[in-house]
Amino acid sequence: MAKTRNVLGVLVLAAVAAAAPPTAQALELLAPDAECSLATGHLVVIGKDAKPPAGQGSLEWSGGTATLSAWLGRFSGVADLSAGPQEAKILFGGETLSLRLVVAPEVPGNLYTYHPKVLTEECAACHDPNDPPGPGSNVAKACYGCHTPYTARSSVHTPVAQGLCSACHDPHGSRNAAFLRWKPEVVCTACHNRPITKDHEKVKDDALCSECHDPHGSNRRSHLKRR
């Protein structure tokens, strides 16, 4: 009887373990993409941890190991990679993130481009190290330190008016033009999902929305570039 109870106990524990949801990974890579190509071997990794550890992690690659700088749940590190396929690992807070990279500028379809301030490791040019921005933060003050404000137009796109530049642009880098978070042909549909008439000639030709509309704003209705 005792043996039967033990077997049942093992089966119950196994069933509970199988039913338990997988633990969500706390690490999030902000730059670069985990799989991409780089124009040069200068790798800058940036990320954050939902449950930051007390201490530092490391960045490992075939050519060596570097200690990650850590502050307020964020981390960063640099490495110099050789040309060709490369693998690297980020170890932070007991978790691991793997990167598969190719240092080859002749692969434009998958080429990741860093924001210039990231590549030169000038984090403090945009960030207050004691106050990292949260999701949906107004980042216009940091962006307009270098970029021309778009707010002097009669009709300003809502994210621009609210200082949410990072809603469309990745401030660290991207594989898309203008550091867009998504490809130009789909970036608008991340928010604008209303059906568009099939009689619209430009839509029928699969033209980009930005060919007619200014995504930052305009002095014309519907953010049109011209009448």
Image (cartoon, rainbow, N blue to C red):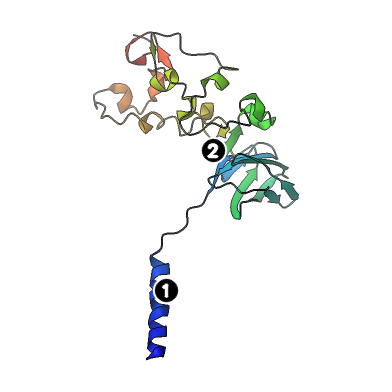
42 vs 197: above or below: below
Q: Nearer the viewer, residue 25 or 79?
A: 25
Q: Nearer the viewer, residue 142 or 38?
A: 142
- Residue contact between numbered discs 2 and 1, judged by CB atoms under 8 Å: no
Name the residue: 69% across, 31% down.
121
Q: Quadrant of the C terminus?
A: top left
Task: Kindly indicate the quadrant of the structure image that contains residue 119.
Answer: top right
The residue positioned 38% from the left and 17% from the top of the image is: 212
Return the residue at label 1. Answer: 14
Residue 88 to residue 72: above or below: below
Residue at x 42% of width, y 23% of height = 159
Picture quadrant where residue 7 is located: bottom left
Q: Position of residue 168 (x, y in %)?
A: 46, 28
Residues at marks 2 and 1, CA–CA distance in whole angstroms: 46 Å
Q: Which residue is the extreme one toward the right?
A: 64
Q: Could you tell me which residue is drawn at 41 percent across and 30 percent down?
A: 185
The spot of residue 68 in percent (x, y) is 69, 44
Residue tagged 2? 109
| Image: 178 above or below 59 | above
Q: Position of residue 183 (x, y in %)?
A: 45, 33
Q: Position of residue 10 (x, y in %)?
A: 42, 79
In this picture, residue 166 sits left or right of residue 45 = left
Give the amino acid at mark 2: Gly
- Extreme bottom residue here? 1
Which image quarter is the N terminus in? bottom left
Q: Amino acid at mark 1?
A: Ala
113 vs 90, nearest the viewer: 90
Q: Secondary structure at mark 2?
A: helix
State which quadrant residue 16 falls in: bottom left
Q: Total of numbered circles in the picture?
A: 2
